Image: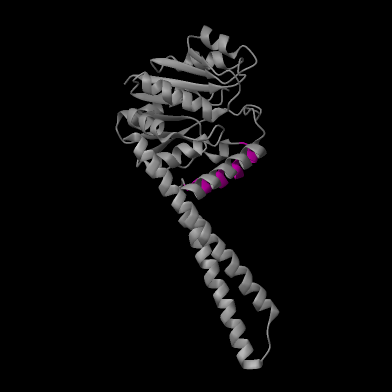
Amino acid sequence: MKTLAAIPCYNERVPIGSVVLIARKHVDEVLVVDDGSTDDTAEVATGAGAVVVSHEGNKGKGAAIKTVLKYATEGEFDALVLLDGDGQHDPNQIPLLIQLLQDDTADVVIGFRNLNQMPRYRRLGRVVLDITTAAGRLTRDSQSGFRALNRKAVEALQRENLKSEGFSIESEMIMAARDQKLRINDVPIHCNYGNGKTSTKDPISHGFGVLNYILGLITEKRPLLFIGLPGFVFTLIGFYFGLMLLRQYNQSGYFSMPFTMLAGFFIAVGILGVFIWLVLNVISRLLKGKENSSEK
């Protein structure tokens, strides 16, 4: 298999050299996407033997991965391995991920991190994002940046036109792979967190940013499940309280304000939810029709 290891990075001049040197032992080519670094990350990576593509400014990890997918597609690689440039991922574990591709048991392989090896402040965030991504049946670690894709997966994700420019790209890739019916598997890996400061972004803002993007993406892709269905349920609850109000009024002549407020609230919110679902459904159909026309 002609294999490419790709490393999106920003200001990683200290670890990037050793990451590239070790990765080169296991792949045919190493690509470093320098996402607007202000230090000499690009020079160090080039000196270590990597092909370097530099962004003019810091566009985000998502933008760097989209550059990688384009490069891998045009370079006709059979496999792509993504890993971080901060030393968190051990390049010597690359063969573990590639093996599942070679065995043809998966199109996408995720490096699974056991929660016990992660800093405590990261664990809760990862669990929440795993649940939100609905990745439990696909992989045990939706946020791991250490992953391998075969040619089929690279081309499918390239066609998907991924939208995320930031760290939420990991979740979007899994959701897109699921939509494309790609086989997803995972393999245990070990990560080096050092002093716990491997990330260039604050973990709290990172987590909330990814969660916000995932919820927006899910709402856009599955409006019936996350807006229409809850809206319908809220409407039924509102009618229930309305019936309770009428029943109490017929029996005692007492007009209950609490029942009135509850019925009005649930019916209003429910009808609004159903209306928003209908609008999003129409917009989604129009956009899909436009995409199909442009492809033809």
* Residue 74 position within the rendered picture, expressed as x and y whole percent measured from the top left: 37, 20
Range of residues picked out in magenta:
119-134
Counting from the top left corner in percent of width and height, residue 153 is at 36, 32
Q: Is residue 137 visible?
A: no
In the image: residue 99, left or right of residue 199:
left
**Most foreground residue, 173 or 96:** 173
* Quarter of the image where the N terminus is located: top left
Taking the spot 51% from the left edge, 67% from the top edge, the residue there is: 233
**Residue 51 visible in the picture:** yes
In the image, residue 67 lies at what x, y percent? 47, 23
**Residue at x 35% of width, y 42% of height:** 181
Up the image or down, 286 lies above or below 10; here it is below
Within the image, what quadrant is residue 152 found in?
top left
288 magenta-colored:
no
The x, y position of residue 10, in whole percent, is: 60, 21
Q: Residue 173 lies in what quarter of the image?
A: top left
Q: Main secondary structure of the magenta part?
A: helix
Residue sticking out furthest to the top: 47
